[in-house]
Amino acid sequence: MKIDFQGKIALVTGGTKGIGRQVAEDLLSLGADVYVTGTSSLPPVDLPVGNERYLAVDFTDRNKTERFFEVVAKMDRIDVCINNAGINRINPIDETLIEDWDDISAVNLDAPFMMVRCVSKIMKANNYGRIINVSSVFGVISKAWRVLYSMSKFGLRGLTVSSAIDLAPFNILVNSVSPGFVVTELTQRILGSAEMERMAAELPIGRFAQPEEISRSILFLASDLNTYITGHNLIIDGGFVNV
Ligand SMILES: NC(=O)c1ccc[n+]([C@@H]2O[C@H](COP(=O)([O-])OP(=O)(O)OC[C@H]3O[C@@H](n4cnc5c(N)ncnc54)[C@H](OP(=O)(O)O)[C@@H]3O)[C@@H](O)[C@H]2O)c1
């Protein structure tokens, strides 16, 4: 048994760094043609590599987002779509800002919704599709100061479950993954090194995940090895939510 993406066309949002970068590189190494998105108007210097193309979009900008989806809608084929781009801003509920919710909901929830709506038309025409929404353990449980992030990620669960039902008859499987704590820029920015060390000691597995440990699970769900799992949320957290 082998995971193979030869001949597949994949789209990974937020494919410039962190989990998304790892997924894009793994898809490329397994033979896929990969479109990645990032926010800067020009591709970062080390991108694109091999059979990779870069698309610029900032999902907090509705005009740019709509133009981006006009481009995606013209594609003939997308076999694999990874809704990975995500942001987080933390605050206690009574100090949350509506501007933060505007941005978080635009990136973490509106963009995946618009993406599933758009690519499912293309996937239906080809009777094939694998969509993975990158959620979080804070889309299953929550924690102090995570209200906006959790609101967006719990919403993503609704998108996953409902669209999985609509799209199953067309051989389009929609799943989500919920990583716990992963060593990326986002984690570094939100937690900082001292808190990362303190929290790692509290995890049953005793450490944070590396992006490749999340990517492997995403790739399985996105591959031809997955023929029957849909609407599922796979928690990848080193045992965190069980404590
Ligand atoms: N890290 C964790 O511990 C963890 C845990 C659970 C879930 N997650 C989820 O995993 C996903 C990836 O997280 P990460 O830690 O890998 O994040 P990251 O290292 O901060 O990378 C975020 C990616 O999203 C893109 N992005 C940021 N703002 C955007 C915007 N306004 N519009 C469009 N794209 C935007 C970035 O593009 P540019 O670089 O071009 O700006 C980048 O490629 C997110 O959905 C996050 O919620 C992460």
Image (cartoon, rainbow, N blue to C red):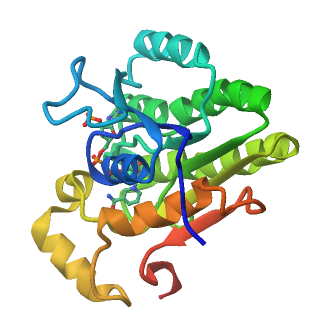
Q: In which quarter of the image is ligand 1?
A: top left
Q: Where is residue 88 in the image (x, y as percent from the top left)?
A: 34, 46
The image quarter in which residue 34 lies? top left
**Front-most of residues 86 and 152:** 86
Q: Position of residue 52 (x, y in %)?
A: 35, 33
Residue 143 in view here = no
The location of residue 170, given as percent across then percent down, is 83, 40
Q: Check the picture and name the quadrant holding the N terminus.
A: bottom right
Query: Which one is nearer the viewer's eye here, 111 or 215?
Result: 215
The total of numbered circles placed on residues is 0
Q: Is residue 240 visible?
A: yes
Residue 192 higher or lower than 97, as above or below: below
In the foreground, 140 or 143: 140
Left or right, 91 with respect to 43, comes to right
Residue found 51% across the figure and 58% down from its top = 219
Image quadrant where residue 44 sits: top left
Q: What residue do we see at 54% from left, 19% from top?
A: 72
Horizontal side, residue 190 vs residue 2: left or right: left
The residue under the point 58% across, 18% down is 75
Residue nearer the viewer, 137 or 133: 133
Q: Farthest residue to the right: give it.
A: 169
